[in-house]
Amino acid sequence: MKYISTRKGLSAGAAETIFRGLAPDGGLYVPALSSADRIQPSAAGDFRSAEEAVLAALFGDLPAEVRGEAVERLLARFPAADPVPLVERDGLLMLELFHGPTGAFKDVALSMLPVFMKHAAGGRRVLVLTATSGDTGSAAMRGFAGVDGAEIAVFYPAAGTSRIQRLQMTTPADGNVHAFGVRGNFDDAQTAVKRIFADAGFAAEAAAAGVALSSANSINTGRLVPQIAYYVFAAAEAGGPVDVVVPSGNFGNILAAYYAKLLGSPIRRLVVASNVNDVLARFVKTGVYDPGDRFTVTNSPSMDIRRSSNVERLLWILNDGDCGEVSRLMRDLERKGRYTLRPAAAARLAEEFEGGVADPAETEDEMRRMRERCGCLVDPHTAVAVRVAGKLGYPKKGASCVVAATATPYKFPETCLRAFGADVLTDPPSGFAELERLPVAQTAVVDVAGMDDAVRGLFAAKGAAG
């Protein structure tokens, strides 16, 4: 599979896209799909088969043994019988993506990425940089912990994550994992990380210390591609056309569903569920991407994002691979703070996607309603998706409705206590109960302007040690 950068059309193979993360032109890598890449539903009889089929189609130039090792590492970290169950709840099909080690959908790809990264690095030492709104950080730290030749630095909002999310990032004591609280929000951290990647001088400093920089965010194809299997599997398991509703922050998860559709899965509509930081919901309705100046810390913190990186990949698709148009839109975002799609692209967006919003009060109300209606405890992000599905009238005639259940409620005890008025989280998943008893090993907090020096300190130390 050939990959193309969104801004200048530079081409690369799968291994290079995994190793680099961000393309040299500052854009993102997208797969150059053709009709020959379509996946038949019969190839997705279970989740393992779906994952193997997706990797064969999009990472086919990686050795089969590397793909196989990645799948085995994933399955070893999830319940063996059913890693991502599809269960009926109140007329919806809930795709439970939270049964991995940190209780969030990120665990699937981040169990696999270290295998891909080690192969792509070819013996080079890698420093993986990741900005997180809450869940990617802990999953990345767990995935890379103890991996030879790899170091990982996670930057998370010092205020704005749940207590459990913070503990999952601040208690790991492995020597190759590092977490930094940032005095700012996710957008601030993500912008700084992308700027570091784009800085040739910074890369030269890292190289002089014997370190290459890469990413574990969904800007990396090694994160994005494995997630496609969720929806290839779900559509096949549902046995017919499905509409998909995804609580959306950085747009990688719902983009994976769109790629599943492009690969032939019978997916009809893709529904972006937003909290009050509703940039994405407004974008799919209007074709105007306008982050605005308002940022709200909500009870669904992993969605508290205004600048969603993966939208750039969607722009490339909507504009039929016109890199010049993607570059224009991204320049408009930087210079004007917003951009507007051309009419043809906006029409295609509206044809494929729909958007809706649930505010914090509606989110907690939905958590209560789901418990009362079907005895189901859902986390606040999943509750946003369920409420939006209801507002928009899903399921609709002719298709089942798949809702991505993206995290366990045990990651958000404060919100659960407020929503239910009592502690209903009585049987925590493995590893959650002891979090409160573990010592905090990661104590660093930095300003956004200090992120460069935090990263520089890590590879400088490694260079001196080497």
Image: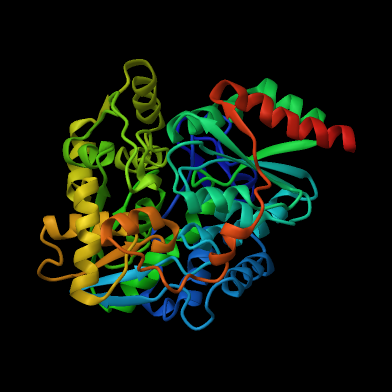
Q: How many marks?
A: 0
Residue 8 appears in the rendering: no
Q: Describe residue 252's horizontal placement relative to residue 387 as left or right.
A: right
Of 300 and 437, nearer the camera is 437
Expressed as whole percent of the image width and height from the top left, the position of residue 251 reads 37, 46
**Residue nearer the viewer, 227 or 319:** 227
Does the rendering let one see residue 181? yes
Q: Could you say which quadrant of the image residue 96 lies in?
A: bottom left
- Of all residues, the one furthest to the front in this rendering is 422
Image position of 128 with respect to 366: above or below: above
Decide: is 69 above or below 351: below
Query: Of all residues shown, which one is farthest toward the bottom?
Result: 81
Please provide percent x and percent y for residue 110: 57, 57
Residue 167, compared with residue 159, is above or below; it is below
Q: Residue 348 occupies which quadrant of the picture? A: top left
Q: Quadrant of residue 341?
A: top left
Decide which of 379, 357 is in the foreground and name it. 379
Q: Is residue 120 left or right of residue 9?
A: right
Relative horizontal placement of residue 384, taking residue 166 as reference (left or right): left
Residue at the spot 32% in from the left edge and 68% down from the top edge:
377
Query: Is 337 placed left or right of 108 in the picture?
Result: left
Residue at (84, 33) in percent of width and height = 463
As drawn, which residue projects farthest toward the top?
335
Q: Position of residue 223 (x, y in %)?
A: 52, 53
| Quadrant of the frame with the C terminus | top right
Residue at point 40% right, 56% down?
A: 412
